[in-house]
Image: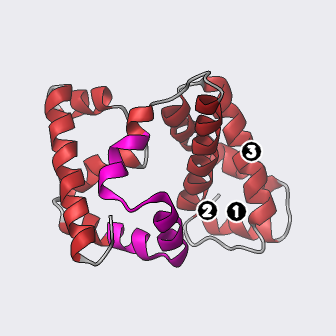
Amino acid sequence: MHDAEIIASFLARDEQAIKEIEKKYGAYCRSLAKNILNRPEDAEEIVNDTLLAAWESIPPKTPKNLKTYLGRIVRDKALTRYRALRAAKRGAGSFELLTELDDCLPSKASVEEAVEAGELTSLIEEWLGVVPKDDAALFVKRYWYGESVNSLAEEYGVSPNRLSQRLFALRKKLRSFLESKGVTI
């Protein structure tokens, strides 16, 4: 089923929409959640919570890109779960992934304000459009999909240390780009 048909099913309040999302995007959602949490049981729960959140939010929302919409819900829920687990000192996921971008993004309050206005997202998308495609793909794989440095290093045929240096350079470029656009870091 195409995304437009799935969204139409949601708008018609047809429960088949949930089954279609699970069939089409379940593995994608599980992968995102698992990359953040490193706990399959929590990832499965996040996917179920995401399906419920999609059901509750469509309508009134009508996402333009269903996969991205679901990805954002999964990431938000997985990061919330990660923080709760970490606060409870039970540990989970990769704290490294969440802290790598701290040096090139504004403070949390500023990020929330900018994201609400769509400005930060637009600026990052603009930056991804000007960096080489290979660098943009690496950045998205690491910071959107949460893939590990080791798996990316293997994919790119370099050592994890070399890949970490490349990611560091990309973060520096992002920081410079954002500062040049007036974002206070």
Residue 106, given in percent of the width and then of the height, sits at 38, 62
Residue 151, given in percent of the width and then of the height, sits at 31, 28
Number of the label disc, if any, that sits on residue 6: 1
- Name the foreground residue: 142 vs 102: 102
- The quadrant of the picture occupied by the C terminus is bottom left
Three-letter code for the amino acid on which mark 1 is drawn: Ile
Residue at 59 percent across and 62 percent down: it is 66
Q: Secondary structure at mark 1?
A: helix
Left or right, 107 with reference to 179: right
Q: Main secondary structure of the magenta part?
A: helix
Structural crowding at the residue carrying mark 1, measured as other residues with C-alpha within 10 Å and reported as few (<14), some (14–19) or many (≥20): many
Q: Earlier in the sequence, mark 3 or mark 2?
A: 2
Residue at 70 percent across and 62 percent down: it is 6
Residue 177, given in percent of the width and then of the height, sits at 22, 68
| Residue that label 3 marks | 49
Label 3, label 2: how far apart the Cα atoms are:
22 Å
Q: Quadrant of residue 127?
A: bottom left
Q: Secondary structure at mark 3?
A: helix
Residue 108 lies in the magenta stretch: yes
Single out the mark in the foreground, 3 or 1.
Answer: 3
Looking at the picture, does residue 120 appear above or below residue 142? below
| Residue that label 2 marks | 2
Image: magenta residue range: 98-125
Residue 114, given in percent of the width and then of the height, sits at 47, 72
